[in-house]
Image (cartoon, rainbow, N blue to C red):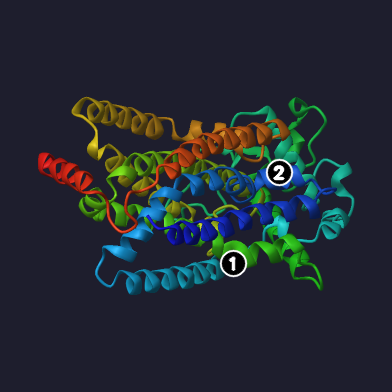
């Protein structure tokens, strides 16, 4: 594998990693005195995942990306032209996707300047001293969400149905359920002392959520109301989408061209298989954080989600990540013995069954550990786990790079023979 390929892939991945760190760093710097930890935890899929396990995934996929690039440069007909065209199309697709995600009418809290958030007093003004508001101050609502998330496993039973089914009536004799509403009701110091007068119906809470959603948008759209974090996030969002597309493309193409890869890159197969497995495990954290955000956002923003933006496409992202994980599973275990394959199948079936049966419980726990309930300790643990994974990857990668290839253009003859014999035995 050429040094030029390693350098090119290293530069691209380094740019992606820096973009992940910059976005979160700007948020911490700008919102340092404005609940930065609560906001970053609320949007953990953006500000906690990418600078931790996003970078872990990048490092894990370094060797697979180098092999993929080198294979197209040397062993695929018209590989340079095809690789260049695919790279340009991926960049354009990332830009278009970022524009679609940021084009929603629903604005995020971090997109509003911190001074405006601190100055927001709710509706009516200073109503937070009473039992109920038309709409709570934005930062107070976020803080209430954090407090409840840290003392309660799961928030799904507090969600409101703001778009009821018009094809059926409520159950005969059933009274409208009253629950605490994060968008309208001040939270007492002792959460267990919430009274019946502080619990409201779905209709009232949905109206408060509409006011909350509109208030965030109005502050964002006010003159000079957009935060620096919002500008940086918008500018660097294509890097995150490019990252996701690249992982998918590399995985698919390595699996599709497995025979050619085994023929020319046999010595790199352990590193590739280890890399894709670590990357798959790291990426599992993303849909967990994403669903934790969706559950929390549904309690502040208008229930049911907007007609555009991230909340409307998040389920599709989760499905795509699941399909990608299955692809990697088959790819990784393709060369293992039958005993290991059977263990992998059994483990996959057990894991899938648990995920299906305990889906809501898993999301409830994720809200506490990786979502709006995550405290500084949780964030520190997340960073520590990511640093430990990076240290292991660095040790393995250094060992692989120290093993110089005998030839700059092709593997030695004995390696080609072993690869060929391995391919024949697989048949």
Q: Secondary structure at mark 1?
A: loop
Nearest the viewer among 359 and 79 is 79
Measured as percent of width and height from the top left, residue 102 is found at 59, 66
Image point (70%, 40%), residue name: 145
Image point (36%, 54%), residue name: 67
Asked if residue 188 shows in the view, the reply is: yes
Left or right of 314, for residue 18: right
Among the two numbered marks 2 and 1 on one chain, the one whose residue lies closer to the N terminus: 1
Q: Secondary structure at mark 2?
A: loop
The image's mark for residue 104 is 1
> Which quadrant of the figure has residue 16?
bottom right
> Which quadrant of the figure has residue 226?
bottom right
Left or right of 380, for residue 160: left
> Which quadrant of the figure has residue 192?
top right
The quadrant of the picture occupied by the C terminus is: top left
Which mark's residue is nearer the viewer, 2 or 1?
Answer: 1
Q: Which residue is mark 2?
A: 182
Measured as percent of width and height from the top left, residue 56 is found at 53, 43
The image's mark for residue 201 is none
Q: Residues within 10 Å of mark 2 (few under 14, many from 20)?
A: many
Position above or below: 229 against 223: above
Nearest the viewer among 285 and 51 is 51
Nearest the viewer among 244 and 264 is 264
């Amino acid at each position: 594998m050429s040094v030029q390929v390693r350098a090119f892939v290293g530069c691209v991945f380094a740019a992606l990693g820096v973009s992940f760190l910059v976005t979160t760093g700007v948020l911490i710097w700008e919102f340092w005195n404005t609940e930065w930890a609560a906001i970053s935890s609320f949007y953990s899929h953006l500000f906690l995942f990418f600078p931790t396990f996003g970078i872990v995934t990048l490092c894990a996929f370094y060797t697979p990306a180098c092999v993929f690039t080198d294979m197209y440069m040397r062993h695929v007909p018209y590989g340079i032209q095809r690789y260049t065209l695919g790279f340009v199309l991926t960049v354009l697709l990332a830009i278009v996707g970022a524009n679609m995600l940021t084009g929603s009418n629903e604005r995020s809290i971090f997109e509003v300047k911190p001074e405006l958030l601190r100055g927001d007093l709710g509706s009516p003004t200073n109503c937070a001293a009473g039992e109920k508001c038309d709409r709570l101050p934005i930062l107070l609502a976020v803080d209430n969400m954090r407090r409840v998330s840290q003392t309660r496993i799961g928030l799904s039973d507090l969600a409101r149905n703001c778009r009821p089914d018009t094809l059926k009536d409520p159950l005969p004799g059933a009274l409208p359920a009253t629950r605490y509403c994060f968008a309208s009701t001040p939270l007492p110091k002792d959460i267990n002392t919430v009274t019946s007068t502080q619990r409201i119906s779905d209709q009232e809470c949905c109206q408060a959520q509409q006011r909350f959603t509109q208030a965030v948008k109005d502050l964002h759209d006010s003159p000079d109301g957009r935060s620096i974090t919002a500008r940086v996030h918008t500018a660097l969002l294509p890097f995150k989408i490019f990252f996701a597309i690249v992982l998918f493309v590399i995985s698919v193409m390595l699996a599709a061209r497995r025979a050619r890869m085994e023929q020319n890159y046999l010595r790199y197969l352990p590193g590739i298989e280890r890399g894709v497995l670590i990357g798959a495990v790291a990426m599992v954290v993303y849909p967990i954080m994403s669903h934790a955000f969706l559950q929390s956002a549904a309690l502040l923003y208008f229930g049911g989600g907007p007609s555009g933006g991230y909340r409307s496409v998040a389920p599709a992202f989760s499905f795509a990540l699941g399909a990608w994980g299955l692809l990697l599973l088959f790819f990784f275990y393709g060369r293992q013995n039958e005993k290991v394959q059977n263990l992998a199948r059994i483990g996959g079936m057990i894991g899938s069954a648990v995920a299906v049966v305990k889906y809501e419980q898993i999301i409830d726990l994720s809200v506490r550990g990786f979502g709006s309930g995550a405290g500084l300790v949780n964030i520190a643990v997340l960073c520590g786990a990511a640093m430990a994974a990076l240290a292991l990857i660095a040790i393995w990668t250094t060992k692989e790079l120290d093993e110089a290839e005998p030839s700059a253009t092709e593997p030695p003859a004995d390696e080609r023979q072993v690869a060929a014999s391995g391919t024949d035995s697989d048949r």
